[in-house]
Image (cartoon, rainbow, N blue to C red):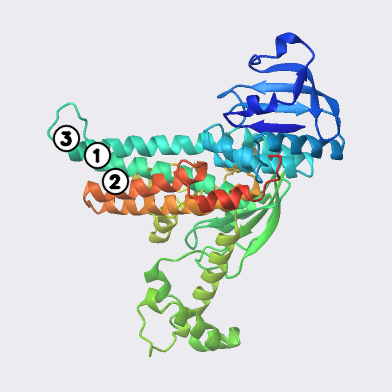
């Protein structure tokens, strides 16, 4: 098959053709098929061909397109190509047909990358992923996020340009922050899907997090249905992390129980009375704790000459292990003790966007702290909340169902062509960072023009995902990998 695309595709392709029917000699009908013979002056023969035609605006490239289907002989095809080049065509560069389709607005950049993935697919699964992306799934998500941000930007700029107009409904600070957080959370979900690229066949890692004595180990045992973790009523029982295989409605998961994340004041006041005992229990503790504390000088406001405090080293070590597990895990179950107010460490976790997070209210058999529900409503927006009790079994089944639902949601929407995932992840991180700065500015009541500037940066970053914003370097990087025929 030989494909020609461009404004003169038909006039050039028809020069060497001899049509079988007199009705086919003129300009063909759109999406028509006719039979003809292709005259080869170099060998003095005519080759039978099927001629397909697409008019401008109706083809893959958006231009006039002609395809000549004939006998699959390499010398014959080379002779036909030579004849057409002599008539005014040139050879296409790698990926040029798909590049023209993108420039004509027929496809976006993720769809262009999906074309290459279809060509390179090696099994049914990789082909299915590429075909779903080619159908425009990622484009719909990005267009929805752009529309939400454009609406916010228009409202902000209306407030700036027409502050006295009665017809312009002002956007309150609370509404602005809430909507920015919602868009950012959705972007983080897509980013998590791009970066993970995992399926249900992969063993997911789900980590239980929260303050010390928040009921993590009890919930760990309740979810597994067996006693695996040591449970004690004093905080800080878990010093290492514990893992176990967990079957969630047929999905294999690695469940992780680790040490609690303490508030800063709790951390500095703990383990203050037993340094000698600690040295005996933890050989080499002095050297390890020195390294940990030197890496955290700025966080702890220590001077360069400050000596390491051995008293809090076990908590530091335990927290470092816990943070490592949180980083490695794909999903987080954040445990919140219903009998206590939200800890600073919990607020810090909630302020960090994460696509796959569930808040598990633990110890529901105890009386609720009066400040907990209002705090959760304010800080846990867009995050599933499940009320549980490891003692009575309340909410355990529901929590398993929510975990399974999130895993299946990832499997249904999270598969992205690898080249797209690599290219788009950076752009979405930039968009998320810009929205994070916009939220901070809004929280500190900065000028709306500063918030609007950050939203524009987020819009540009999202636009680069689909190609609404692009550079020649991006196009060269993508289309240089294509074969000539595409």
Look at 59% across and 32% down and name the residue there. 6
Q: Find residue 324 and report its image quarter.
A: bottom right
Provide residue 260's location: percent of width, then percent of height. Answer: 51, 64
Provide residue 265's location: percent of width, then percent of height. Answer: 37, 70
Residue underneath mark 3: 162
Q: Decide: few, some or many residues near mark 3? Use Cα within 10 Å; few <14, some 14-19, many ≥20.
A: few
Q: Residue furthest left?
A: 164
Q: In whole angstroms, how far apart are the C-alphas of marks 1 and 3?
A: 8 Å
N-terminal of the two: label 2 or label 3? 3
Q: Decide: few, some or many residues near mark 1? Use Cα within 10 Å; few <14, some 14-19, many ≥20.
A: some
Q: In whole angstroms, how far apart are the C-alphas of marks 2 and 3?
A: 15 Å
Helix, strand or loop status at disc 3? loop
N-terminal of the two: label 1 or label 3? 1
Residue 474 visible in the shown view? yes
Residue 368 visible in the shown view? no
Residue underneath mark 1: 157
Q: Nearer the viewer, residue 480 or 137?
A: 480
Provide residue 393's location: percent of width, then percent of height. Answer: 59, 44
Q: Find residue 19 and report its image quarter.
A: top right
Question: Can you say which quadrant of the picture contains the N terminus?
Answer: top right
Look at 62% across and 63% down and name the residue there. 230
Q: Nearer the viewer, residue 275 or 327?
A: 327
Q: Nearer the viewer, residue 196 or 92?
A: 92
Label for residue 440? Answer: none
Look at 46% across and 53% down and name the residue there. 337
Q: Compared with residue 89, is residue 211 higher up or lower down, i.e. above or below?
A: below
Helix, strand or loop status at disc 1? helix
Residue underneath mark 2: 452
Q: Decide if residue 63 is on the left or right side of residue 167.
A: right
**Would you say the residues marked 2 and 1 are in contact, meaning their CB atoms lie under 8 Å apart?**
yes
**Would you say the residues marked 2 and 3 are in contact, meaning their CB atoms lie under 8 Å apart?**
no
């Amino acid at each position: 098959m030989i494909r020609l695309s461009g404004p003169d595709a038909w006039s050039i392709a028809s020069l060497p053709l001899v049509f079988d029917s007199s009705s086919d000699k003129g300009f063909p009908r759109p999406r028509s098929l006719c039979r003809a013979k292709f005259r080869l002056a170099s060998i003095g023969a005519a080759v039978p061909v099927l001629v397909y035609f697409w008019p401008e605006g109706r083809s893959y490239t958006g231009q006039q397109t002609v395809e000549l289907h004939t006998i699959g002989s390499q010398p014959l095809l080379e002779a036909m190509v030579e004849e057409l080049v002599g008539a005014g065509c040139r050879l296409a560069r790698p990926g040029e047909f798909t590049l023209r389709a993108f420039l004509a607005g027929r496809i976006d950049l993720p769809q262009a990358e999906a074309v290459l993935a279809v060509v390179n697919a090696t099994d049914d699964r990789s082909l299915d992923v590429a075909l779903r992306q080619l159908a425009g799934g990622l484009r719909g998500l990005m267009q929805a996020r752009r529309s939400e941000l454009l609406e916010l930007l228009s409202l902000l700029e209306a407030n700036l340009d027409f502050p006295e107009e009665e017809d312009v409904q002002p956007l309150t600070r609370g509404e602005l922050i809430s909507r920015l957080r919602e868009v950012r959370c959705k972007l983080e979900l897509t980013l998590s899907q791009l970066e993970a690229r995992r399926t249900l066949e992969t063993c997911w890692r789900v980590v239980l997090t929260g303050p010390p004595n928040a009921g993590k180990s009890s919930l760990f045992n309740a979810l597994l249905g067996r006693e695996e973790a040591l449970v004690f009523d004093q905080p800080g029982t878990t010093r290492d992390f514990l893992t176990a295989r967990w079957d969630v409605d047929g999905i294999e998961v690695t469940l992780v129980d680790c040490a609690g994340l303490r508030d800063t004041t709790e951390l500095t006041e703990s383990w203050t009375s037993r340094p000698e005992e600690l040295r005996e229990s933890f050989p080499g503790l002095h050297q390890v704790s020195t390294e940990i504390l030197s890496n955290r000088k700025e966080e702890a406001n220590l001077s360069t000459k400050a000596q390491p405090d051995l008293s809090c080293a076990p908590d530091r070590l335990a927290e470092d292990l816990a943070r490592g597990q949180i980083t490695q895990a794909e999903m987080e179950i954040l445990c919140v003790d219903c009998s206590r107010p939200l800890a600073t460490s919990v607020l810090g976790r909630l302020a960090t966007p994460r696509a796959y997070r569930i808040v598990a209210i633990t110890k529901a058999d105890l009386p609720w702290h009066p400040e907990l529900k209002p705090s959760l409503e304010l800080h846990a927006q867009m995050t599933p909340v499940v009320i549980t009790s490891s003692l009575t079994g309340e909410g355990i089944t529901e929590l398993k169902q929510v975990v399974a639902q999130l895993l299946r949601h990832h499997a249904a929407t999270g598969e992205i062509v690898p080249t797209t995932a690599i290219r788009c992840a950076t752009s979405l991180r930039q968009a998320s960072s810009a929205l994070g700065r916009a939220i901070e500015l809004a929280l500190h009541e900065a000028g709306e023009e500063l918030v609007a500037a950050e939203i524009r940066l987020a819009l540009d970053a999202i636009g680069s995902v689909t190609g609404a914003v692009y550079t020649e370097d991006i196009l060269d990087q993508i289309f240089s990998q294509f074969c000539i025929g595409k």
